[in-house]
Image (cartoon, rainbow, N blue to C red):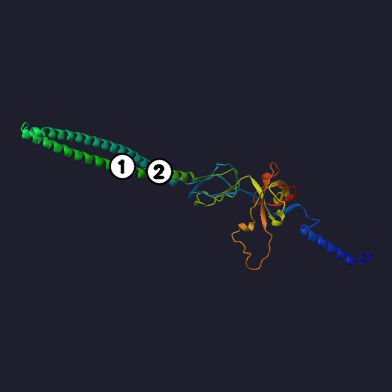
Amino acid sequence: MKNIFRYPSIMVVLCLGIIGVMIVLYSWQLFPFNSQVESTDNAYVRGNVTLLSPQVSGYITDVKVQDFMPVKKGDLLFVIDDSTYRQEFLQAQAAAAQAQVTLQNFEQNRASGAASLQLAEAELQSAQATQSKATLDTGRNGPLLEKGLVSKTTGDELHAALLTAQANVAKARASVNIARQSLALVDANKASLAAAFKAAQARVEVAQINLQHTQIVAPSDGQLGEVSARLGQYVSAGTQLTSVTPKMVWVTANFKERQLAGMAVGTPASFTVDALNDHAFKGHVVRIAPAAGSEFSVLKADNATGNFTKISQRIAVRIELEPGQLQSDQLRPGMSTVVSVDTSQAPES
C-alpha cells in the first residue's frame, strides 16, 4: 500500500476514478447522494389568460384602453358600430308587436266565432220549436179536416207552415255546422300564430344580444395584454383584440416519472423565479396530472413499430402558492422557475 503512494500518477488515476464514480452516483441520485427533495427546472408560472374577441362583426368606433392596463370586471374596453344592430333590434321589436296583434286578433275572432256558433244553435232550437208546433197543429187539425170541420184552406196553410218549419230547421242546422267549422278553422290557426309570436320574441332577444355584444367589456379583474384593436378597424367575430390576465397564478412543474415516488397532494414545495433574481416562494402540491404529457399530444408515438428507445416521461404537477408572500404580485404567467418538492414531508395517505 505504501508503494502506491510513492507514485503520484497512480494517485491521480485513483482520485480521478473516485471523482468519476461520485459524479455518476450524484447524477443518478444514488447512495450517498439520494435525496428526498425532487427538483426540476422544467417549470413555469401559469395563469388563466383570457383572449378577448368580439361576438359580432363591425367597425371599431371607440378604444377605451391601452396596452397592459389594469381593468375591473365589467369595464368597457371596445365599442363596435351598433347602427346596423340597433336597426335590426327595432325591426325585430316591430315584427314581434305585429305578431302579438295578430295573436290578439285571433282571440277576438275566436270569441266572435264562438258567439256566432251560440247564435246559430239558438236559432236551430227556435226553428225546432216552431217545427214541433207546426207538427202538432197539423196533427191536431187533420181529423177535423177529414170531417169537414176545418176548411181546406186552413189545412193547406197548416201544411205549408209545417214545410216552412222543416226548411227552417234544416237551414239552422246548416248554419250551426258552418259556425262550428269556422270556429275549428280559427282554433287550427292558434298554434301557428302562437309559434310565430314566440319566434318573433326570440328574434328580439337575439337582436338585443347582438346589440349588447357591440360593447366589449372585461370578463374579470386583471391586467390587459397587448391591445391590437385600432379605431376604425373592421373586425370579424372571433378576431383577437387583447387578453386579460387575472392576478391568480400557480406553478406547473413537469417532473420525470421517477421523481413522483412519494409525491402527493399537500406535499410542501418551494420554487425560485429567474425573473425575480431567484427569489424563493413557498407552496404545496394541489394536483397531479392524470397522465404523462405525451398522452395529451396530438401525434402520439407508436412504440409497437420500429426501434424502441426508452424516454423518461414527464408528469405535470400543479403547485399553489402560500398566501401573503413578498413579491408574489410580481409573478407573471410564462415565467421560468426551478421547483423543489420535499417528498419526506408528504402527508400520509
Q: Amino acid at mark 2?
A: Lys
Quarter of the figure that contains the N terminus: bottom right
Residue drawn 30% across the image and 42% down it: 184
Q: Secondary structure at mark 2?
A: helix
- Distance between mark 2 and mark 1 Cα atoms: 19 Å
Looking at this view, is 63 or 49 the one in front? Answer: 49
4, above or below 105, in the image: below
Looking at this view, is 209 or 143 the one in front? Answer: 143
Nearest to N terminus: mark 2 or mark 1:
1
Q: Secondary structure at mark 1?
A: helix
Residue 228 placement, left or right of 315: left
Residue 88 placement, left or right of 257: left
Q: Is residue 89 visible?
A: no
**Residue 123 lies in what quarter of the image?**
top left
Q: Which residue appears farthest toward the right when viewing the image?
A: 2
Q: Identify the mark at residue 234; answer none if there is no mark.
A: none
Label 1 crowding class (10 Å Cα cut-off): few <14, some 14-19, many 20+? Answer: some
Label 2 crowding class (10 Å Cα cut-off): few <14, some 14-19, many 20+? Answer: some
Residue 284 placement, left or right of 50: right
Image position, residue 94 (x, y; %): 38, 42
Residue drawn 33% across the image and 44% down it: 189
Residue that label 2 marks: 198
Q: How many marks?
A: 2
114, above or below 21, in the image: above
Residue that label 1 marks: 186
Q: Amino acid at mark 1?
A: Val
Image position, residue 254 (x, y; %): 68, 54
